[in-house]
Image (cartoon, rainbow, N blue to C red):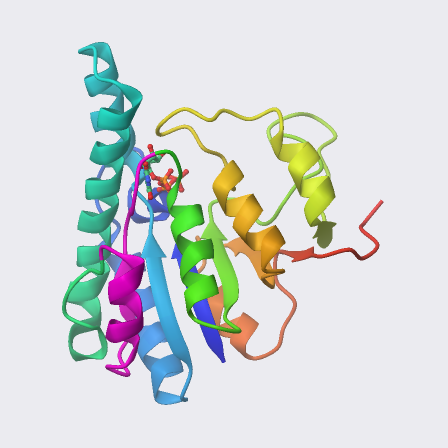
Amino acid sequence: MRAVLKIGGSLLYDDTGKVLTDRITKYAVSVRALLKEGHQLVIVVGGGKPARTFIGAARDLGATETQCDWLGIKLARHNAELLCVALGEAAYPRVVEGLDELETAMCSGRVVLMGGLTPGQSTNAVAALAAEVVRGAKLLNATDVDGVYDKDPDKPGAKKLDTVDIKQLKTILAATSARAGEYKLFDPVAVRIVERSKIETVVFDGRDPENLLRFFKGKKIGTTIVHGQKEDT
Ligand code: UTP
């Protein structure tokens, strides 16, 4: 199987900002096993707590949104480097910084890592764009919730959806922020790419790295984004 795995930066840090090296190691072990089984993987890592800390400080200091975005882009690349280190020989040794470089890196037969790409989007857009480049790739979004909810999961009565149509997803996301460091789940660019190429996408709880292996074993995890089919009620 070809897949682009997006690992939310929030999964790599605890509340104090400490790097969760055990979790990174667990992901590396699972990804190496998948590579051995013949699966092709691109991994996009998000900016997480350091991105939010730097973006918050830069904004207080009067930075433009573009300057804030560049901080997030670079910090996401640094986070990708951590996974690159944990994967060792299994990883293409350089974090890929452009989509043109992605195709070349894929030819290495190793796991390819990416962070941010360009201002005005989140790493979910990077992952969606990578899934377009890697033809037929599924998009697996490992995040810190167990799937997509019909409203903000912190609000009372919010219900987790097993499947969600891309159009319903757009309505759910319409209320969320589009400022640097504040994207929740999917930013508008990511949604547009997933929709235009009908990319098979799954949003799942990445706090348990075993979920990744469960998916590759054919088990149902998280929420599947569908295109033009009946959604949950
Ligand atoms: P993300 O918001 O994608 O990080 O990137 P994340 O870790 O996946 O998010 P969480 O922690 O799981 O919620 C951090 C910031 O970097 C900038 C944006 O400002 C984004 O909010 N960024 C990232 C870009 O501008 N362009 C990119 O291609 C990627």
What residue lies at 25% left-to-right and 74% top-to-bottom? 104
Q: Nearer the viewer, residue 14 or 173?
A: 173
Percent of width and height locating residue 230: 84, 54
Q: Is residue 14 above or below residue 55?
A: below
The quarter of the displayed image where residue 44 is located: bottom left
Q: Nearer the viewer, residue 104 or 172?
A: 104
Q: Is residue 14 visible?
A: no
- Outermost residue, front side: 100
Compared across the picture, whether 18 is left or right of 178 comes to left
Residue 113 belongs to the span the image colors magenta: yes
What residue lies at 58% left-to-right and 61% top-to-bottom? 199
What residue lies at 47% left-to-right and 55% top-to-bottom? 128
Percent of width and height locating residue 86: 19, 66
Q: Is residue 231 above or below residue 87?
A: above
Compared across the picture, whether 80 is left or right of 218 comes to left
Compared across the picture, whether 65 is left or right of 218 comes to left
Q: Is residue 78 visible?
A: yes
Q: Nearer the viewer, residue 37 or 73?
A: 73
What residue lies at 21% left-to-right and 10% top-to-bottom? 62
Percent of width and height locating residue 232: 81, 49
**Quadrant the C terminus occupies:** top right
Percent of width and height locating residue 35: 35, 82
Q: Which residues are magenta?
A: 97-119
Residue 188 belongs to the span the image colors magenta: no
Q: Quadrant of ligand 1?
A: top left
Q: Is residue 160 above or below residue 23?
A: above
Q: Is residue 186 above or below residue 195?
A: above
